[in-house]
Structure formats: structure tokens, C-alpha cells
Image (cartoon, rainbow, N blue to C red):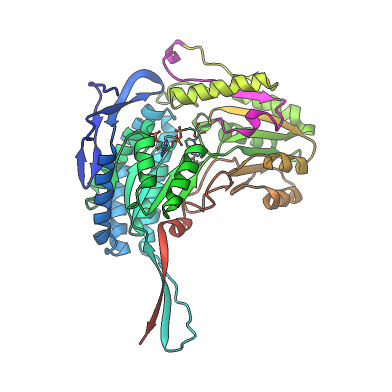
Amino acid sequence: MSTNVAAKTYMNYVNGVWKESTSNETIASYNPANKHEVVGNVQNSTREDLEEAIQAAKQAEKSWKKLSGAERGNILFSVANILENNLDEIAETMTNEMGKTLPEAKGETARGVAILRYYAGEGMRKVGDVIPSTDSSALMFSKRVPLGVVGVITPWNFPVAIPIWKMAPALIYGNTVVFKPATEAAVTAAKVVECFEKAGVPEGVINLVTGKGSVIGQGLADHSDVNAVTFTGSNQVGKNIGSSVAARGGKYQLEMGGKNPIIVAEDCDIDLAVDAAISGGLKSTGQKCTCSSRVIVQSSIYDTFKERLLQKVAEIKVGNGLDSDTWMGPCASEGQYNTVRKYVQIGIEEGAQLIYGGDEPQSDGLRNGYFVNPTIFEGVTSSMTIAQEEIFGPVLALMKVDTVEEAIDLANDVEYGLSASIFSKNIDSILSFIDDIEAGLVRINSETAGVELQAPFGGMKASSSHSREQGEAAKEFFTTVKTVFVKG
Ligand SMILES: NC(=O)C1=CN([C@@H]2O[C@H](COP(=O)(O)OP(=O)(O)OC[C@H]3O[C@@H](n4cnc5c(N)ncnc54)[C@H](OP(=O)(O)O)[C@@H]3O)[C@@H](O)[C@H]2O)C=CC1
Ligand SMILES: O=C(O)CCC(=O)C(=O)O
């Protein structure tokens, strides 16, 4: 493990105390825009550290769940205010640590603030229903109660918003949390947890344990005192976590990949569709599970669409996310960079035509980062790897079809079903799309990415474990129901 002495070292947060791992080892987190710069060091934790955190969370749940929803909500309102006051610093850390541009990082942090306020308000809303009993002298009602200890395992691509959209609902409904962030975004995660500490969240209610996924993530999945696990990340890891938690009777929720299509119908506003393909496919360097990666275009407008797309993509400025003129930052890590390069090569070998990018920007200032240019393939068919597998990079695959029906069939011809969009002015095409598309997020004349915190979020098919996150849907996952029968 490498520790950089010049960079700050961040501790675990266990039972209200910032503490070192029993391993006495740290892991350095590097800036993907400059691989020689260490953003911070985080603890390389052990199962012993995790055990302490889980027991602290178990103990704390007894009193946390006894607070009223309004009391827990007031604490979350304070966390929101503290996060808002530290927005610039946290966003800058995010940009340094995983590469997204500063405006995107600020937008995401502001979204974290809004999510916290939404769930803080949830503390004043109902947690049950009165149900008429067949016995006229009895009172029957349902009451939602917390699950207990929740393990939160998150990825690096939304290092503020995803942890908050899992932890805020877990906490407001009375659960306690053990949080294992992605190692590549663990410094940002520590700064988010500092906001919870400063807001006075009682000891043990939220615990941060950084370290390897195979040790800490798997440890959460296996531990019988962890009542539920919520995960966002890759399909492979998600499936393993799901089966580990299910094997011991725990509850789990998985949000995983996407291979999201955007259908460009011949009657659409082509400029709008071009903007959506670029924004939905290339923002955040294509590292969103909701990113558009397949652009399915009707043949009658294909050439016009392609020409305008190429014109606009040529205007994209790749660079360090902190520079104000950068539109697209680096890949988040060497691993992601290698993955993108690998898929570009596979695309070429399988016969797709590379019509833009596929290489790296040549500017001297970018030599030390994991930069790639936006990339466009055409002549992509559904059997090709780049039409089937999640790349998680700035790569668009253009596919040509004759009809909207053909487009919808092609759109559905993947194992994933997270988000899908159509650009059309024809109400029949739009209604068929809404009915027939296999996706949890169905977007009309709007890009595939972009999630609203008050609405259910999740996918069909291999994209999720069929549950939904965010909005009121979170209540389903983070609580269980008691049916109470009272006879006087
Ligand atoms: N749906 C989405 O939003 C995301 C999808 N992905 C997809 O996954 C690919 C790989 O990205 P990657 O970061 O490796 O995603 P992972 O699924 O490996 O990581 C997600 C989280 O799971 C943890 N983890 C890793 N291995 C295990 C394990 N064996 N048991 C329990 N937890 C584990 C990670 O910890 P640690 O960081 O320590 O490894 C991280 O906290 C991407 O290229 C992309 O296709 C990635 C991120 C988000
Ligand atoms: O599109 C978004 O805002 C959310 C994307 C997301 O949840 C993810 O990439 O994991």
C-alpha cells in the first residue's frame, strides 16, 4: 500500500471517532488528471475495523430509532446546511479525485443538499395507514419500522449524490449506517461524512470504513448483523453481493449497469437530438449508468444527424476538470482508461467504423492524465460487443434502422434496461415507445441521463434487482411493515 506523506490522511469514522485502521496501512487516492498527484490517503481497513463499525451501528440503532422522525429530520437539515456551506471545497475534491468537471461536481454536491432536505422533510410524513378491520371494535393499522443496520456500498462516479441518496433515507426511517465508499472516491466520501459529524449525528449512527471492496464490501454482504445492503456499481460485483446477502436472509438492493439507447426518429427536432446524444453520452466522460451509448437513427435522416453530431463533437474541449473551458474531464482511473481503450480496439476489430476520436488528446498539459477523446463509431450492429457491453466511457455507437418499430426492437436487444429515450414528434411513435421499451427510465425528447431525486430510480432486466431508489420508493427498501391490531 502506498502512503503519500505530503497529502492528508483520512481516517475511518467509527462510533463517533475518527480512527486509524488496525492494519496501519493506507491507500493513496490519485488525481486522474495528473497521475502523479495524490489527493489524499485513506485507511486500508480490516475485517476487525468493520466489525467494530457494525457493532457500533447495531448499538446506536436502539436510540436512533426512538427519536421522532422530526428530530431525525432536523439533524438531516443541519447536514444539508453544512454540506451547502462546504460545497465548493467538496466539489473541488471530487474533481481532483475522480475527474468530472467542476460545474458537474458542484451540481452534484448541490443535488446532495437537495436530497438531504427532501428526506429531512420525510421525517414529518406518514409511516403507515389505518386499515378497516372486520371487527368493528378494533383498530388496525400498518406501521413502517426500520430494518436495523444498513450497509451502503457505493461507486466512484457520483461520490456525493449516490451515498447521500442511500444514507439519507436509511437514516430518516431510523436505520443506522456502515458506509463503504469506492476507494477511488474515498477522500470525497470522508468529507461528506464530516458534514454528518458536524451536524451532530449521534455516535454510531453513521460509520465510514474505507478499504478494499473484496474485504470491506464483501464483509458487509456476509455479516449477519447487517440487516440490509444497498449497492451501486458493476453487474458482476452486484450479483455476488446480492447472492451473499440473500443466502443469509438479508435484504438487498442493487443498481448496476446500463446500455442505454437514444432513438432518433425521422420526425424529430434533429438539433435537439444531437445535443441530447452529446450531453447524455459524453458528459462525465460517459461514466454514468444512465449514459446514452447506442444512438439508433432512422435511415432517412441518418446522414444529416451524423454530420451535425460530428460538427458538435469537434467543439468539445477535453481537459482538467478544474479548468473553466473544459467540457469533458479524464476517465476516473487508469482502469477506466484501459477499459475504454480496450473497447475501442474491440469495436475496430469487430468491423465497426471509427468516425471520430478513439485516441487521446495531444496537448502537452494532458500527458499525465487518463484523457481520451470523445469517440464515435458507425456501422455498429447489435451482435457487436460495443453494442452489448457497458463501456462506461465517452463512446457513442451509431446504428441505422428504417422504422421506429425496428428501433425499439434493437433498443431492447441487450441484457440491460436502465434508461432509454426517443426523439420524435409523432404521438403514435411516442406511445409505442412508452409501452414497448424495456427500461426503468423512459425519456421522451430528453437525454437518457438525468435523474430527479423525488422520482423512483432503477432499471429493468440486468440493470437492477427490481427495486427502486429515491423519492418515496426509498421507503419500500429502507423499512419493513408491521400490521398492528388493537382490541380494546
Ligand atoms: N451503475 C453504476 O453507476 C456504475 C457502474 N460501474 C460499472 O462497473 C465497472 C467497474 O467499475 P468498478 O469501480 O470496478 O465497480 P465495482 O462494482 O467494482 O465497485 C463498486 C463498489 O463495490 C465495491 N466492491 C468491489 N469489489 C467488491 C466485492 N468483491 N465485494 C463487495 N464490494 C465490492 C467497490 O469497492 P472498491 O472501490 O474498493 O473496489 C465499490 O465501493 C465500470 O466500468 C462500469 O461499467 C461502475 C461504477 C458505477
Ligand atoms: O444520471 C444520473 O443522474 C444518475 C446516474 C447514476 O445513478 C449512476 O451513474 O450510477
Q: Is residue 88 visible?
A: no
Which residue is painted at 32% across and 58% down in the image?
A: 73
Q: Is residue 376 left or right of residue 338?
A: right
Residue 441 placement (x, y as % from top left): 58, 48
Which residue is painted at 75% across and 27% down in the image?
A: 303
Residue 270 placement (x, y as % from top left): 69, 35
- Taking depth in this image into account, of 356 and 10 the one nearest to the observer is 10
Q: Is residue 290 left or right of residue 190?
A: right
Q: Which residues are magenta?
A: 364-391
- Taking depth in this image into account, of 25 and 88 the one nearest to the observer is 25
- The reply to whether the magenta stretch includes residue 382 is yes
Farthest residue, direction front: 247
Residue 35 vs 304, above or below: the answer is: above
Q: Is residue 335 left or right of residue 196?
A: right
In terms of image quadrants, where is residue 227? bottom left
Residue 388 placement (x, y as % from top left): 63, 33
In terms of image quadrants, where is residue 278? top right
- Report the quarter where the C terminus lies: bottom left
- Taking depth in this image into account, of 426 and 390 the one nearest to the observer is 390
Q: Is residue 76 visible?
A: yes
Count of marks overlaid on the render: 0
Residue 457 placement (x, y as % from top left): 52, 49
Which residue is painted at 39% across and 42% down in the image?
A: 153
Residue 120 vs 236, above or below: the answer is: below
- Report the quarter where the N terminus lies: top left
Magenta region, main secondary structure: loop
- The reply to whether the magenta stretch includes residue 143 is no
Residue 280 vs 33, above or below: the answer is: below
